Image: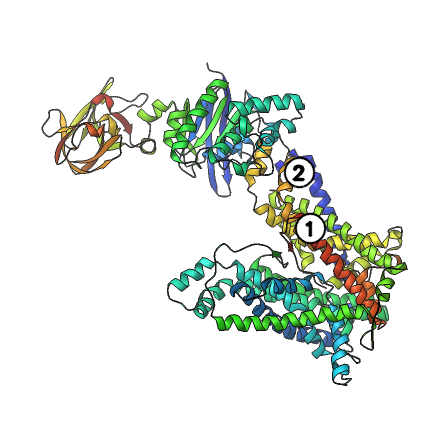
Amino acid sequence: MRSLQREPGVLLALLAVIVLVAVFIVYPQVRVILTPGDTYVEFFTGGTWRNSLIHSLEVMALSTTTAVALGFVYAYAMVYTDMHWKPFFRLIGILPLLSPPFVVAASYVILFGPRGVITYGVFGQTISVFGLAGIWGVQTIAFFPFAYQLIADVLSRSDPRMEQAARNLGAGSWGVFRTVTLPLSRPGLGAAILTTAIYVLEDFGNPALIGGTFTVLPTQAYGLISGFGDLPGAAAVSTILLVLALVLYFAKVRLDGPRSFVTVSGRASSMPRPPVPAKVSWACFASCLALAGIITLVYGSLLVSALSVAFPGNPTPTLANFEYIFSGPNGTALQNTLVFGLTAAALSSLLALVAGWLTERGRWRGRRALDLLLIMPAAIPGLFFGIGYALAFNEPWLDWLDRGVLIIISMIFWNIPVGYQAAVSGLRQIDRSMDEAATSLGASSLRGFRDVLVPMLGGSIRVGFVTTFVRAVTTLSVVIFLFTSSSTVATIRIFQLVSDLNWGRATAFTVADIGLSIAALGIVAVLARGRIALGGARA
Amino acid sequence: MPDIHLRLDHVTKKFGETTAVDDVSFDVPRGSFATLLGPSGCGKTTTLRMIAGFYDPDAGDILVSGRRINDLPAHRRGTAMVFQDYALFPHMTVRDNVAYGLRVAGIAKDERERRVNETLEFVGLAKLGDRWPNQLSGGQQQRVAVGRALVLRPEVLLLDEPLSNLDAKLRVQLRWELRSLQQRLGMTFVYVTHDQDEALSLSDWIAVMNAGRVEQAGTPWEIYYHPKTSFLADFVGAVNLVPATVRDARGDDVTVAFGERSLTVRAPAGVALAAGTAVRLCVRPEALGLARHGASNTLPGTVARRAFLGDLMRYWVTVDGREWIVDQPDPGAGSPYDGEVSIEVRPERVHLIAES
């Protein structure tokens, strides 16, 4: 505390962060929770939420189980075996992290829908693929790559030396895995399962596209607002969603600490792991090949659809869809996506960096509380966050505020945990003697931060920036209540075009959106000389 | 009256329930090489960090040149520090590291370059200015760390175990470099170490700390030959501490009894020893002589074991069921002792410590 008084610059920065967090993280959430007010009683006794809640839990249990199971196989294969094609599988595993979350649903409709390539084209059937089974299948494919990234991270953190030691003491490869690797990584695996469950629970795009009458909590909240203008009802439903997400999130934090984002890094293990039997290796290779095949099919069908007049009915190649998305208001949407994403990523990283420094290096009271608030958006469903912003900032006296600015602000704060946690973990790796050296040479702590810590945090800043950008350009649920026609973004246009069953244009937009993410990642990877790193995106 | 440069006045620092530094006071004269010596956890680094401004004392004052600096932020204290791990900025070259403090201070470019060059020359790094820290050896990094702090001509230079990450030979060499630097510049150094050899060989003044308190402060000579407590005697160098009782105290002479033997030695300064007081004889191993059995005025004993240390032979000799350590210089001059021997005790080499 005394050190703060001596450095007014730091105190000012701290106050600024506290005000921003209060206004843009705490206040919107409080608004949502308070909005239903007296109608809570009526709402809960009415019971319209019961079906959605049951559906949400059902879907969460099913999709999480299968996604984690597949993710585990993929991760085990990548970390433990020396199978072929690893670089290819790694690439395939990253692709879904760079996409809007609902691409799987979109390609699922193209492949299995009423006029689907496979169901209608191959089998001549028009079976109903919507509802629970559809969501389950789609979410399994959509989220197993996330589970894979999380589990691979956990498994690769287990120490090869322990495994070598177990082998040295006579355990077989299955024995080592069962008695050493698994027990050591159990908390990490538990956390990975819970994180995947949060992704599934909060998923809005997939159930919205293929849920049909099967509503889950996010789609019910959306339906209440867009169909009935029932803001209190939507707020109440989202609050249920928030409570579930927070329960899962804090259970996860208890297991594994607050690290909640999938990160891919070029970290190479220094010591080889004991080899696994060839049979296991081949089984893993076959499984990965099958899964990679499905992912390839998903993205391939999107690309083919984007390049066709009306796939699958009329597969004549055309560039008309791409001409459409680059023209007029659609071009604006793409441009907005890029501008909003870059601005949000830059400002979010900057704010996160300062906030991370204040909480990690500061010695003032209350920093634990600020830390909690800064990681909290990681647990907040995007839809809840978006409704909060709509409630808090769609006020008449704020009419002068451009909606684009509001979208940028929502992206900044919804993603702040990404950059914040990157900054904090980066700072933890820099010994305090670095700060003290600068201080003892006459630099104020802000000056030392700027001259010494920020240059040393390059890697963490890049992780935060790319991940925030990717999440910003792929989010649908956060912005769906905030856009206007002049401030629309790619994900919104995709959602609208899909609703109009305009698949060619929707998929072209999707391809362009994924292209933006890949380009951002590529540019930063080149700048960082190949050391890529990013965090996972979600709905 | 010496010119007091740094003064700690009843300084206390607590971390939660533990008192890391407990009511510490001392004065460091201007231009002296002062060392805080003690085992790990004794509070020496905490004391140094309070001087640097990284910790705030809970009580007491810290004064530099008579001015209280408690409320001065760390970066305005003019107490540049050399860190144990050097804390060189990895993204700056050697030259930029050394120039950093001057740049922060807003020193003009010409003046800055002149002083950086001068300092690099001074610490023997003139040719390595454009290297990066990770391209330097440990000893070179250590010199950069010292140069980076020296270039600012700080009021007081603080050094936190700056040699502990180096191998033994280099450590000894850099000791002399540091000492000669300090003497050429006439600057006040406050040096923290747990290494007694380092403390003895470098310092003008040593404060030995234990459990947050200064046990004794003084010249290396005083600390080594006239320790006030058994802890001190034992911590600084090898020592024989033999329990004894004061039989008779008259003027400067004290007669003490241990076992069935007695010895008349000089009374320690400033301690009143009445007859019957429990004391310890404190004799350094190298102050004892060893002879074949039977010499007169000696303690008869048996060699229990011995260790060849190169420059000397260390013997553990059992006398009346108690082991004495005796060092004999130049072991190569004769064949080692074995079996029955006699220990030669010169009364003027025996120091008395009152049992507390």
| Comes first in the chain, label 2 or label 1 | 2
Give the side of residue B195 with respect to residue A492, left or right.
left
Is residue A339 positioned above or below B275 on the image?
below
List x then y, in percent, for residue A95. 68, 63
Residue visible at 48% across and 27% down in the picture: B190
Q: Residues within 10 Å of mark 2 (few under 14, many from 20)?
A: some
Q: Nearer the viewer, mark 2 or mark 1?
A: 1
Give the camera-side residue of B205 and B146: B146
Query: Can residue A443 be seen here?
Result: yes
Which mark is drawn over residue A524?
1
Give the camera-side residue of B158 and A122: A122
Residue visible at 55% across and 61% down in the picture: A154
Query: Can residue A232 be seen here?
Result: no
Give the side of residue B112 with respect to residue A167, left or right.
right
List x then y, in percent, for residue A10. 67, 38
Residue visible at 79% across and 81% down in the picture: A114
According to the picture, the residue beneath numbered tag 2 turns out to be: A450
Residue visible at 74% across and 83% down in the picture: A122
| Quadrant housing residue A120 | bottom right
